[in-house]
Amino acid sequence: MDQGASRPAVPRSRERRLDLDRARGIAILLVVFGHVVAQQAPEGNTWYEPVRFAIYRFHMPFFLYLSGTVVVLSGLLATAPPAWPAALRKRAVRLLVPFFGIGLFILAAKLVALQLVYVDNPPEGLGGGLRDLFLTTARSPALSVWYLLVLFLCTIVALLLRRLGSTGLVLLGLALQFLEVPPLVYLDRFASHFLFFAAGLWVAERQGRMLPAFEAWQPLWWAAFALGIAAAELEWLDARWSMVLCGLLCIPALHGAIRRPPVSAWQWPLALGRYAMAIYLFNTLAIGGGKAVLIAGGIGWTEAWFPLHVAVAMALGLGVPVLLKRLVLRRIPPVDRLTD
């Protein structure tokens, strides 16, 4: 933790933070929209790729920021070293069991589906799929699961280096942006996203000052965020630094907006937020299945049919995981806990 009397310790939060639930709901909606297209939008389409590019500048950084916030509010970062093994075992069950389970399930589902229908991002057989899933992860057949492993790695690093304080961890995250980390075991994504996790730690430890500032200066934050998105779209910055800029600027803009009316009264983000883990785990399977059925039914991956593909993908990507959670996973307590 940072040293100094100016920053009081953050007590473990026992009260449900509805702003964080709403933030997760809005963030998971953006995730599903980004997953509508696994590789390339249909030729001739001009609107989706710029929107997806903009979303990818900030939506996963925002998720990592929220995760860092929760780590502080839950008291995990304050865990005494003798209790680290137990805490990390619990964290591993929470994050790594779904990481391996869903990754292997997606790989198996794609290997079976390849015999029947069109499959996005197909694996190169069982051996190649396993290699790409866990080692050469730039070509992972289940790329969407990276967040779970990266969040686990962020937790370990934050605990081991907590004497640096949250400011030191933010500086470490900035330093990692200058490294060219190979895409092995998702370490490249850890290096590019640890900064935002550390930003969540930093803000949570100062939430008494920072959150009111986020709310009070909304026009300023949104103007800065909009300029960051414009700089990214106009390619004034490369992909890495545009994500750094937009990922940091989105924090006060989005979190402040979520805490103010009218967003603070919206109910739909709360509903999605409650199912965020299930949606994250299962949305790509639902989207891929829907796309395969549409193509098999003669509705091609074309500019003319693309709006229907988007609508179906969004409906399935959100609806199927929620129904799966409510109708099936709730009946299996260990799986229910892992997908909460």
Image (cartoon, rainbow, N blue to C red):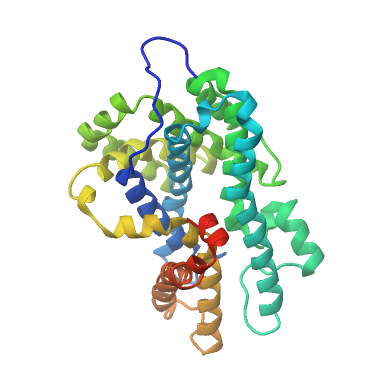
Residue placed most toward the observer, 305 or 264: 264
Horizontal and vertical percent position of residue 147: 56, 49
The reply, left or right, for residue 176 in relation to residue 131 is left
Which residue is farthest right? 127
Foreground pick, 251 / 242: 251
- Up-down relation of residue 95 to residue 162 (above or below): below
39 versus 82 height, above or below: below
Residue 47 as seen in the image, left or right of residue 170: left
Q: Position of residue 42 (x, y in %)?
A: 50, 72
- Using the rendered image of the protein, determine whether residue 178 is visible from the camera's viewpoint: no
Compared to residue 98, the image places residue 80 above or below, namely above
Give how far across and how far down residue 331 sits, in percent. 50, 68
Residue at image position (41%, 71%) is 319
217 shown above or below 24: above
> Residue at 50% across / 63% down in the picture?
35
Side of 279 relative to 115 (left or right): left
> Which residue of the protein is positioned furthest toward the top in this rendering?
5
**Residue 126 in picture, x, y percent from top left:** 78, 68
Q: Quadrant of residue 211?
A: top left
Residue occupying the point 40% across, 41% down: 231
